[in-house]
Image (tube, rainbow, N blue to C red):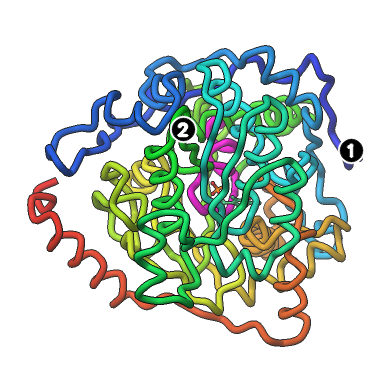
Amino acid sequence: MHRKILLEEDEMPDKWYNILPDLPKPLPPPINPATQEPAKPEDLMQIFAKELIKQEMSDERWIKIPDEVREIYTLWRPTPLFRAVGLEKMLKTPAKIYYKFESVSPAGSHKPNTAVAQAYYNMVEGIENLTTETGAGQWGSALSFSGAMFGINITVYMVRISYDQKPFRKTLMQMWGAKVYPSPSNNTKFGSEILAKDPDNPGSLGIAISEAIEDAVTHENTKYTLGSVLNHVLLHQTVIGLEAKRQLEKVDDYPDKVIGCIGGGSSFSGLFWPFYYDVVTKKAPKDVEFVAVEPSACPSVTKGAYMYDHGDSAKMTPLLKMHTLGHNFMPPPIHAGGLRYHGMAPTLCLLANEGIVKAKAYNQLEVFDAASMFTKAEGHLPAPEPSHAIKAVIDEAIECRKTGEEKTLLFVLCGHGHFDMKAYEDYLGGKMVAYEYPSEEVKKAQERIIELYPWLRNL
Ligand SMILES: *Cc1c(COP(=O)(O)O)cnc(C)c1O
C-alpha cells in the first residue's frame, strides 16, 4: 500500500484555477458603502497590487503561475499526499482516508502558496512595504517569509491575545525580518482609540485588519495584503487540489468526500475547487460531496446571516456578501481552536447557500480529542485548525464502519501544531471546555448591521 504519494517537481501545476466563471450564479459584487454601488477597481487600488485586483475580478478559468513564484514553491512543493493507514487501522474503517500535507512549507502551513504570489506581484509593481494582520500567526509568518524572498519590508499587526500566547510565532516572523506589533496598538489612530477606551482589549482579526489597512493607506509605497477570504487568495491555493488530484490518479482513486476546515475558506477552497471543476465540466467519475468544518465557537456559516458586511471592525473594507457573525465579533477568549474570523469567503458562502458545500461545526473539546487520536495514529501533530477537518473525517470513517461503505475521504492537513503547545498543554491539563456561540448574539449583530445601513435590507 502507498502510504506516501509523491510528485516530481515538473508535475507541479503551472496554472492556478479560478472558480469565478464556473459558479452557479454570478458572485454578488463587493459594495462601496459610501456610494451604495459595486466597488470599482480604483476603490481597491489604494490598498492592493493591480495584478491582484485583476485576478480578484478575472473571468479566466486558468491563470499562469509566474516562473519566479514556481521557483520559490519548489522549496517545499509539490507536497506529499498521505494515505492515513494508521488512522484507518485505529478506526477499523473500510473507508480510505487521504490527506494533503501542507505543513512542510517554511512557515508550517498552506499560507505561503498565496503569500509568495502576493509578495511577487507587489515587488513587480515596485512596492517596497507590505502590511497585514495575523491571528494565530500563520499568515504573518507566511508573508514575512515571502517578504524575505523578494526583499520587501513586512509589518504585521498580531492579535494581542495570540501575541501574548504565541511569542515564538512573533520571533519566527522577526527572524525573517518583519516588524510585529500587538493589535490593538498605538501605531494607528484606530488602535489608539480602542486602547484609550479599553487598555486590556485582547484584539480581534477585525481590529488588526483595520490597523493594517490604515498603516498601508497612510504610508508611501505601501500596500496591504490579506491571507484568506478574497478570490485572488483562494485561487492561489488551488495548487493544493490540483496536486492532490494528480496524486490520487497515480493510485487510481477519486474522493467521495472532500473535507477541510474553514477560517476564511482558503485552504479548503484550494483543495476542493479543482474537484468542483470536474463536477461542472462533467469530468468527475462519481458524485463528490464538499464538506466545510468550523468551530461552534465561531460558527460563521452554520449560524451566521448571509448578508453584506464589512471585513474589518473599523468598516474600512468594502461590504462583502458573506455569512457573518458581525464585524464587531470578539471571539470568546476561552476558545483556543483557531478559525476566529467573523466572516467567510464570498465564493464559499455562495456555494454553501446553494447547497453545493455542506457546513458542519464542532466544539473545541471534540476537535482536540480528534487531534490527539490523529497524532497517535499518524505521528504528525496537526494544528488545531485542521483538527476540525480531522474530527469530521473520523466521524465519516466511523459511519463507514457501521454501513460497510468503502468511501474515499480526502482532507487538507493545512498546518502543523508545533507553535500551538499552549493549547495542547491546556487540553492535556483538562482545562479546555466545550463552547457554542449563542444564536441570539448573531441575531443582534445582524440587526446592528441593518441599523447601520438600512438600504441593505433589500440586497
Ligand atoms: C489560516 C489558517 C487556517 C484558516 O484559514 P483558511 O483560509 O480557512 O484556510 C486554517 N489552518 C491553518 C493551519 C491556517 O494557517
User: Against 22, is 80 above or below?
Assistant: below
Q: Amino acid at mark 1?
A: His
Q: CA distance from mark 2 to mark 1?
A: 45 Å
Q: Are marks 2 and 1 in contact (CB under 8 Å)?
A: no
Is 430 displayed left or right of 157 in the figure? Answer: right
Residue 439 in view, yes or no: yes
Circle on res. 2: 1
Secondary structure at numbered mark 2: strand
Disc 2: which residue: 223
**Residue 403 x %, y %:** 65, 61
- Pick whichever, 142 or 291, lies toward us: 142
Q: Please provide the residue range marked out in magenta.
A: 257-275
Residue 383 at x, y = what percent?
71, 58
Most foreground residue, 392 or 132:
132
Residue 350: x, y in percent? 34, 42
- The residue sitting at 67% across, 20% down in the picture is 69
The residue lying toward the viewer, choosing from 149 and 373, is 149
Most extreme residue toward the bottom is 430
Q: Nearer the viewer, residue 104 or 87?
A: 104
Up-down: is 227 above or below 195? above
Q: Residues within 10 Å of mark 1 (few under 14, many from 20)?
A: few
Q: Which mark is residue 115?
A: none
Identify the residue shown where x is 53% and y is 18%.
126
